[in-house]
Image: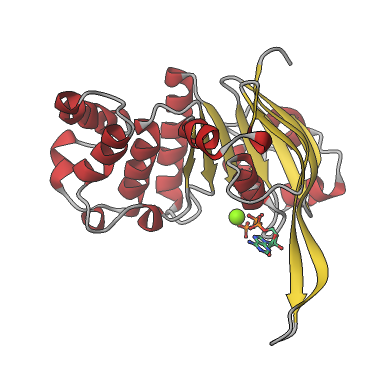
Amino acid sequence: MSDPILQLKDVSTHFPVESGFLFKKRTGTVKAVDGITLDLARGEVLGLVGESGSGKSTLARTILQLVPTTGGTVVLEGRNLTAATATELLAARRGLQMVFQDPFASLNPRLTVFAALAEPLLVHGVVPPDQVPARVAALMEQVGLAPRDQRKYPHEFSGGQRQRIAIARALALEPKIIIADEPVSALDVSIQAQILNLLAGLVRRMNLTLIFIAHDLSVVKHISDRIAVMYQGKIVELGPALDIMERPQHPYTKALISAIPRIERKS
Ligand SMILES: Nc1ncnc2c1ncn2[C@@H]1O[C@H](COP(=O)(O)OP(=O)(O)OP(=O)(O)O)[C@@H](O)[C@H]1O
Ligand SMILES: [Mg+2]
């Protein structure tokens, strides 16, 4: 791959398993991420699927270096994050933004939408203070919200609208990569498609790179260029979305596809 934006080389994140009440003893290891090698192209959408506990969120946190890496390297635009200083890491994280399943958890209930979006702009000096209101309004328009709603609080919005606010907040710092960890799992099916379309449109327009995490292949198949299937900390299958859907090789991928309700399947 020419000019990958992100390169993972043999990345592992293991957690100790401890038991005992007063005297904790290490009794084992959870290999949440276990030897993953993966290159991401600029502008690519990667769907990352796997069952609960397969290590998807830990892989996301490993990319951001929010958990200590056990081994391997994470290289963002040529910079090795696993060897970066705290200051370098802070700068790199600006280019890597996350969107979570539950926007309530990532939005402060006491801040208006204006304050939530203005804060990262001011803290990081993205635009001069006098241009903040215009940028907030532009961010709201980008995610399909009415700029006049910027004085409202998170609880005054619907679940889908709150997820749009969380996406706008992620966009505020003009990231290169967005990692969306099950961003539509908590939403009604009818709203899921709208959020998926919004993300797909933003990726195209802003030349973003997107890692989209889901349990379910049916959620990622339409927006992904490639799909990676994760099982017990490893990527067991990786390929163009269409190939994975139509000619799955790994038994676990086949099982995931057969779990999709029949009404959605072509064959
Ligand atoms: N901080 C931690 N300490 C110990 N074990 C952890 C920690 N974080 C995750 N794990 C373990 O690592 C494994 C992978 O968890 P992870 O949250 O990455 O899975 P996931 O694929 O995101 O699951 P889900 O689909 O339910 O969100 C699990 O066995 C989990 O218990
Ligand atoms: Mg998870």
Q: Quadrant of residue 53?
A: bottom right
Is residue 23 shown left or right of residue 172?
Answer: right
260, 154: nearer the viewer: 154
Horizontal side of 208 relative to 38 (left or right) equals: left
On screen, residue 245 versus residue 172, left or right, reads: right
- Regarding residue 261, the answer to whether it shows in the image is no
**How many labels sit on residues?**
0
Task: Classify residue 172 as left or right of residue 111.
Answer: right
Residue 115 in percent (x, y) is at: 21, 44
Quadrant location of the N terminus in the rendered image = top right
Looking at the picture, how far across and down is residue 91, in whole percent?
Answer: 48, 31
Q: Quadrant of the C terminus?
A: top right
Q: Quadrant of residue 195?
A: top left
Compared to residue 13, the image places residue 179 above or below, namely: above
Could you say where residue 58 lies in the image, as x and y percent from the top left? 65, 51
Q: How is the image coloured?
A: secondary structure
Viewer-proximal residue, 115 or 73? 73
41 or 238, nearer to the observer: 41
Look at the image and tell me whether residue 252 can be seen: yes
Task: In the rendered view, tell whether residue 57 sits above or below residue 247.
Answer: below
Toward the bottom, the furthest residue is 22
Ligand 2 sits in quadrant: bottom right
Residue 69 x, y percent position in the rendering: 71, 47
Seen from this angle, which residue lies furthest top? 2
Residue 240 against residue 218 in the figure, above or below: above
Q: Measured along the vertical axis of the image, is residue 41 above or below residue 194?
A: above
